[in-house]
Image: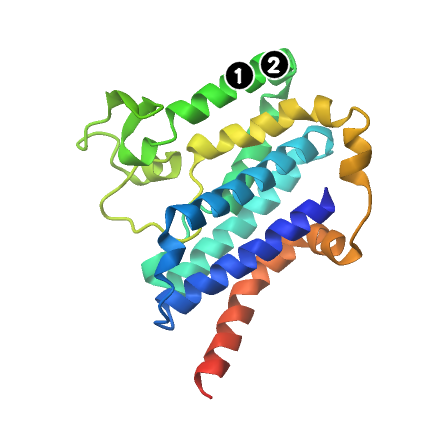
Amino acid sequence: MDEIRGFLIIGVVISHTLFDMHYFFRIDMSWIKSPLFTAISDIGAIIFILISGMVSKYSKDNINRGLKLMCVAATVTLVTHIVVPDFVVYAGILHLLAFAIVLHELIKPLLVKIHRIAGLVINILIALLTANLYGREISIFGVTLFKIPDNIMNGGLSYLLGLKIDNITVSSDYYPILPWITFFFMGFYLTDYIERQPLKSFLCKKRCSFLAKAGRNSLLIYLIHQPVVMGILYLISLI
């Protein structure tokens, strides 16, 4: 699975490079707002979160891992607040994974009592119902079941949950708790299927050492890629 994570983190670097070119260096990349590009980005994020859920099921010391990741995520928030105040990352993928890892460890005794099929169905249903939570509605397949009024749940915590807040600008790295945490728990329940042969052999087979190494160092790459990319783009702009 390291190779899959490596492939995905390279995709993140490319995506953020295009974002930087469009918003900071005024190069027309408006197509990055297209439904197709958004869908590709979302699918990549879903797979990455699924894998994180799978790995965390058998990882030791998840509480410490999650708390350390929370500190890293808080640092990302602080740095973006200072450097790019118009695009502060309050609820990025690191924030989500840190919260999910800790929560999953705390409620693991409950999670393991739920049959894997039931766990998958419950999380898929929650994901569908909250897919448009940012639009302040509970809906399924385009049918609105409940509209959340603008005058309630309008604080910062609601933004972390997944609701649109007027005074907060969404950054390119926005993965609120809902619906995204459901994919982490789906990964938790998918692990039993992944453990079966021949799927396990297929996923664990080494094919590309470069991608595998990138996957094992995905957190480091995620943390350093933005300043490196911005520096390279700035130097190119001087030519």
* Residue in the picture at 77% in, 26% down: 195
Residue extending farthest to the left is: 151
Relative to 71, does residue 230 appear above or below in the rendering? below
User: Considering only vertical position in the picture, is 204 above or below 21?
Assistant: above
Rounded to the nearest angstrom, the CA distance separating label 1 from label 2 is 6 Å
Q: What is the x, y in percent for residue 215?
A: 69, 51
Badge 1 local density, few (<14 within 10 Å), some, or many (20+)?
few
Image height of 22 relative to 138, above or below = below
User: Image quarter for residue 102?
Assistant: top right
User: Is residue 79 or residue 163 the one in the foreground?
Assistant: 163
The disc at residue 144 is none
Give the residue type at disc 1.
Answer: Val
- Residue 72 in picture, x, y percent from top left: 55, 51
Q: Amino acid at mark 2?
A: Ile
Q: How is the image coloured?
A: rainbow
Is 235 on the left-hand or right-hand side of 168? right
Q: Position of residue 168 (x, y in %)?
A: 28, 49
Residue marked by disc 1 = 121
Nearest the viewer among 63 and 175 is 175
Residue at image position (63%, 37%) is 52
Q: Quadrant of the N terminus?
A: top right
Q: Is residue 57 left or right of residue 122?
A: right
Query: Does the residue at mark 1 contact the one at mark 2 (Cβ under 8 Å)?
Result: yes
Direction from residue 167 to residue 102 in the image, left or right: right
Write down the residue under mark 2: 117
Asked which secondary structure carries label 1, the reply is: helix
Q: Nearer the viewer, residue 90 or 8?
A: 8
